[in-house]
Image: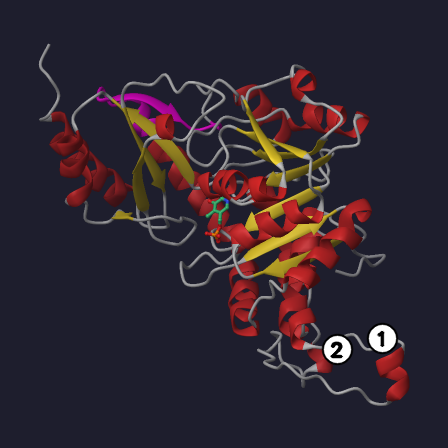
Amino acid sequence: MKKTTILPNPSMNTRLSHTGRRPDEQHGLVNTPVTRGSTILFKNLKSLDNHSQTFSYGRMGNPSTRTVEEIVTELENAHGTVLTPSGLSAISTAILSCIKSGDEILISDSAYEPTRKLCDGLLTKFGVVTKYYDPRIGTEIEEIINEKTSVIFLESPGSLTFELQDLPLITKIAKKHNITTIVDNSWATPLYYRPLDLGADIVIHAGTKMFVGHSDVMSGTISTNEKLWESVKKAHYLTGVCASPDDAFLIARGLRTLAIRMETHQKNALELASWLEKQDIVEKVLHPALPSHPDHTIFRRDFSGSGSLFSIILKPAPREAIAALVDDLELFGMGYSWGGYESLVLPAKPENIRTATVWKEKGNLLRIHVGLEGIADLKADLMAGLNRYSQFLEIK
Ligand SMILES: *Cc1c(COP(=O)(O)O)cnc(C)c1O
């Protein structure tokens, strides 16, 4: 948004409310309307020839998508943002924009599984080699970098196991070797974590999650610093991953309330996580904002708040115990995704995903997205589930 002498540095909440709006251009309407369209007419040959129109074809954006891009650019302190139809298409487009055949990519072992599948399953066909590294790696990352390394892909925290990465350290090393760093920032959102300010080149979001906030739209964004902007914009254009204006309208609507939703998600998640930490049957709570978390120092240094999502490790018990816990929950649904107003759980097995590190926990992992329901109700629902689970524990 425009900075004025009265508001040289508006707060994030003010930016969320005011960025990307143009009531003067749209009959005074507060929100950018849905502008559907493929063909956009040129006024004359000159405007066709010299690309002088703001919008020239549906795939290349329109007022609805521009509003979302402007908001995210503002929040991430980026040079520019492109909107994509899903989080995964943001990841694939960002990666494609900076690799060539023969290159190597380094990915955190904690990264979102489809990111791994994209690299292992598709990029290998083009001669791109992917290597995984311990998310808690420090300066040793330099030992796995070579002259072919072109990208380091980070997710901090990993959205299943919640290790944090030392982003300032990694971006410093990456810059020395002219390597592009891409960060998946879906968990914290730019309200609580700003990877570009910490030295990253590209930030992606699964907008599907917190930006949309209502579990009803797929969306992704790629924001970059000035250096990477032209190549990302070009990759976005060439791969044709354009977002629908109807979806863009809903994403912009979601973004306007991101700050107040995040506050409640954060508060509810922290309260539930601290409470779970006191339950006998819970061996560990993996939430970076808890002092017990191994990466809590990094959290305090680099983040200004925490998200809705964390995991717990339950005492070992057979699969039936998890079924007993999750099948009869009344408020928590079970499903992929997260970020909506409603609470979710997802049992997962990181031991089957990792390759660079060994997942040592013997107990069952349950990922929890804490929604906007009343906290006492969420506790009661989970407590009943934990009691059902505990009936399957071996009595020692
Ligand atoms: C969901 C998710 C994605 C992918 O987003 P989609 O919109 O489902 O494609 C990427 N990264 C993280 C951390 C996610 O949770």
Q: Position of residue 336 (x, y in %)?
A: 36, 48
Cβ of mark 1 under 8 Å from ligand 1: the answer is: no
Q: In the rendered image, is residue 79 in sight?
A: no
Label 2, residues with CA under 10 Å away: few <14, some 14-19, many ≥20:
some
Residue that badge 1 annotates: 51
Dots 1 and 2: beta carbons under 8 Å?
Answer: yes
Q: Nearer the viewer, residue 199 or 340?
A: 199
Return the disc, 1 or 2, that comes first in the chain's sequence: 1
Q: Position of residue 177 (x, y in %)?
A: 79, 27
Residue at 81 percent of width and 52 percent of height: 8
Q: Which residues are magenta?
A: 274-289
Q: In the rendered image, is residue 237 in sight?
A: yes
Above or below, 319 relative to 64: above
Asked whether 73 falls inside the magenta stretch, the response is no
Above or below, 222 relative to 309: below
Going by the numbered disc 2, the residue's amino acid type is Ser
Residue at 22 percent of width and 37 percent of height: 382
For numbered disc 2, what is the local secondary structure?
loop
Residue at 71 percent of width and 74 percent of height: 22
Q: Position of residue 173 (x, y in %)?
A: 74, 23
**Rendering quarter of residue 153:** top right
Q: Which mark is residue 56?
A: 2
Q: Nearer the viewer, residue 269 or 395?
A: 395
Quadrant in the picture for the C terminus = top left
Going by the numbered disc 1, the residue's amino acid type is His
In the image, taking residue 15 as reference, residue 49 lies left or right, namely right
Quadrant in the picture for the N terminus = bottom right
